[in-house]
Amino acid sequence: MKIRQITRDKDDYMDMLLMADPQKDMVERYLYQSEMFVLVNGGDVCSVCVVQLLKNRKCELKNIATRVQDRGKGYAAYLIHYICEYYSDVCDTMYAGTGNGKKMIEFLEHNGFVNSHMAVNYYVDHYQEPIYEDGIRITDKIFMKKQLDSVIDVKKVVDLALEAGRILLKNGAEIFRVDETITRICRRFHVEYVDTFILSHAIFVSAENGMEEAYTKVKQVPLSSTHLGIVAEVNALSREISAGKVGVEEALRRLGKIDNMPPVRGYLQVLAAGIGSGFFGYMMGAAVTESVIAFFIGCILYLWVLKAKKHNISKIIVNIIGGAIITVLAILALHLPFLGNIKMDGMIIGSIMPLVPGLAFVNAIRDIADSDFLSGTVRMIDALLVFVCISVGVGATLSLYNSLIGGMVL
Amino acid sequence: MIHLVMNALCSFMGTVSFAVIFNVPKRYYVCCGLTGMAGWMTYYAFVSGHASAACASFFGTLVVVLLSRALTVLMKCPITIFLVSGIIPLVPGAGVYYTVYYMVTNQLAEASRRGMESVKVAFAIVLGIVFVVSIPRDVFHGLFHSLFHFRRPEGKYSIYINERDEGDENRKG
């Protein structure tokens, strides 16, 4: 069973369309501005339907018909379910107009439509021939409506929410923001019962909307680099979603795009690290010459950090060697004759700054403040470990130098 | 005076360059820089007034977090952006270095003094962040908006308001 959209030669299905709407010129009034779907089973077209897009995120089911020999097999219901999901992205409400006969109204009610409004004597005024259903003349057109966002699959919503959460967590958001985003997205799409359990490197979500079974999903989120731009983008997107401006499909597409947002280019990061080192060095009391050297050390240090990141070298090694690089370069600068009388501490303090785990530190504190003690502890250990590693790198190099030179110059 | 200006400039530029490393969107660079600068200048003022480093860090952090929260409301973006960048100048990188330095050169008394100071500074930062972050969002927003008469941020209260005139198009037949 397959559903296809028909874009050309819609007239070919006219005989089926006429089964639901018996006057040809009335069908032609909407057919060419509408979208048409057919349900194909085993090579035969079994069901056909026509949907017209209206203004203000609304659409109308204009026509739905099934071949005489295929009626009662649920094809039309399947088709309606499909188009409801299809249009849930661009529309909030779907209308369907039908005669005041019992059968069709029951069918629509069965598929989630409720009464909206009616046009009195519509079929008397617009149709030349009187229409009968079960021996009763049809006179009025009953409009029924269905809220489309209630048909969306729980799984789809949870997948979307989880993806948003994963991207946030990966790029350095706090636990409560991830939690809030997931809950917000689920609520928007009428998944009322949501439970989340979020760690610093994993998300668990369990959700149900009261109709289907609960759906649970777990996602591991490895620790990786920070991209606050992505956090800001996802946050903005989740605001738009909860304001009802974005549907599931579009949200997924935009999330994919956000996830692939490139970080700042490598040489700019290196330059930024250098500039940061230089200015912070000066701020902490280094002289101008020392700050300039700190700039260069910072650049070289960040080249190493980027290189290591590319090869997925462990954080511990990156920071120990990073600390060592800083110290070695500072000691070398100390021995350059033309630089005159400079001191080492300003240079080292400045160029340590790019390694300092500011984000992990701040996020750890914020998680603990929000009572997410588990994640807070993990992140705090992460931050402390980085501090310790830098100290080890700097300390080991210093003491090596110290013993080489005999403890005089330091 | 020159010293003051240089400090402001350095903390501003330093914070901005860290914002670049953290991939903060370009439009927030200036705000990040201002946050970092405000934090550092507060710290600097307290240290010049012979306050302890921990005490100065605490007040510096308070300024950073308050400013970050205000900017978050104004610019409608996550607080992390301003907070992380703004805190960087206050992080005790120097303290860590001196601790290691004195340890390596076998001046253990001085090393432990510096080490304790760094820990104190770290705790001061923790306290500063926790104090301000713990103010509930609504209270903070209310305070902020009543102080400055700004509009409430949209999005929060505008869910499902365009439900009127439904079915108008359909009624024409």
Image (tube, rainbow, N blue to C red):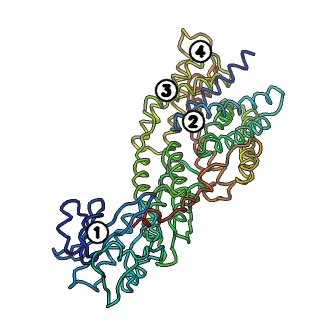
* Number of residues whose C-alpha sits closer than 10 Å to that of mark 3, classed few (under 14), some (14–19) or many (20 or more): many
Amino acid type for the residue under numbered disc 1: Met
Name the front one of labels 1 and 4: 1
Q: Earlier in the sequence, mark 4 or mark 3?
A: 3
* Residue A48 percent location from the top left of the image: 26, 72
* Residue A399 percent location from the top left of the image: 59, 30
Identify which residue is drawn at 73% across, 28% down. Answer: B41
The C terminus of chain A lies in quadrant = top right
Q: Which residue is mark 4?
A: A289
* Number of residues whose C-alpha sits closer than 10 Å to that of mark 4, classed few (under 14), some (14–19) or many (20 or more): some
Q: Earlier in the sequence, mark 1 or mark 4?
A: 1
| Element carrying mark 1 | helix
Q: Which residue is mark 2?
A: B28
Identify which residue is drawn at 57% across, 35% down. Answer: B28
Please identify the quarter of the rendering in which residue B10 is found: top right
**Location of residue A40 with respect to B114 vertically, above or below:** below
Q: Chain of mark 4?
A: A
Would residue A356 be visible to someone looking at this image? yes
Q: Which residue is mark 3?
A: A271
Q: Which residue is mark 1?
A: A26
* Residue A224 percent location from the top left of the image: 48, 47
Q: Are marks 2 and 4 on the same chain?
A: no
